[in-house]
Image (spheres, helix red, strand yellow):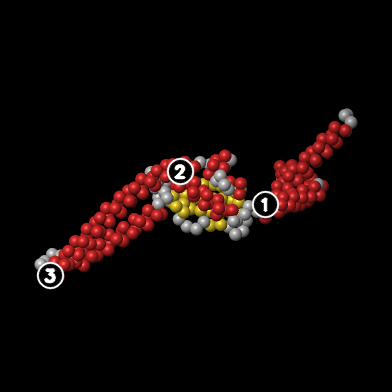
Amino acid sequence: MNEHMPDEINLIDYIQVLLKRKWIIILGTLICPVVAGVISFSMPKIYRGEATFKVTGKEITTGKEIVSIIGNLDGEKLKHVLPKNYNLVDRVRLSALRDSADKFQLIIEAKRVDDIPIAISEFEEYVVNIPLIKRSVEQEKERLLEQVKELSKVIESSAELAKAYNNLIKTGKLAMVGFNPVELNQGISDMKIKKLQMEQALKRLKGVEMIAQPYISSKPVKPKKRQNVMIAGVVGLLASILVAFFMEFLERNKMNLTKPSQ
């Protein structure tokens, strides 16, 4: 039982020190959250916007490549990417999506909600004008234009052929054995649809495209007032306890120094 006495005495001493300096602990625990709350409420509100982009080019095929080419968006780099609106944003972050190789995400934080879509549009304009992406788009455009041109020729010749066959059948100069005008017309219709899809793809061809409307928070994401106050309360409590024990340590050392030597 005597083995536990020193520990029990130390514990009692600690409790006595805490009770003796309780006002320091109480004040420290209260003052820190109050200060943190005042600072948090005085800080500007920050809103966040998130936009997801898809890589559609042939040379650059992954979101990770785009992120690597652009690099960190801070300081002078941000001024280069958003020359018109860099002063409107508070923070810009770019990251590749892990679950989809051809996508990457842009996160923009700003003091005003209305500034976020403006910055997203300017970023998109910058990305599609990156030389490597621009060259890839031009090559893809040439390929699609050539395909549309060839397909137009096939459609035109097929339509003329169908017309000629129909005239021959009507005049009885050609038997319908082995010839199905319905299938031919269906084939022409399919080619026209394919041509239309290619023409639409040409209009949308950018190398990088936003796959959905950006998400913009309606409520501020910063400052996190409640979290800041709670953390400040815990820090204030721990700091006050340390101060209390330090003051007790100084007081006891002072008393030991002032005692007359025997």
Q: Residue 193 lies in what quarter of the image?
A: bottom left
Which is closer to the viewer, label 2 or label 3? 3
Q: Secondary structure at mark 3?
A: loop
- The spot of residue 129 in percent (x, y) is 46, 45
The label number, if any, that marks residue 44 in the structure image: 1
Splitting the image into 4 quarters, where does residue 157 fall?
Answer: bottom left
> Which comes before the other along the chain, label 2 or label 3?
2
In the image shown, does 105 or 84 lie closer to the viewer?
84
The part of the image, by quadrant, that contains residue 3 is top right
Residue position marked by numbered label 2 in the rendering: 130
**Local secondary structure at mark 2:** loop
What separation in Å lies between label 2 and label 3 (alpha carbons)? 61 Å
Residue pictured at 85% horizontal, 32% vertical = 257
Quadrant location of the C terminus in the rendered image: top right
The residue sitting at 67% across, 54% down in the picture is: 225
The residue positioned 67% from the left and 52% from the top of the image is: 44
Q: CA distance from mark 1 to mark 3?
A: 84 Å
CA gap, disc 2 to disc 1? Answer: 34 Å
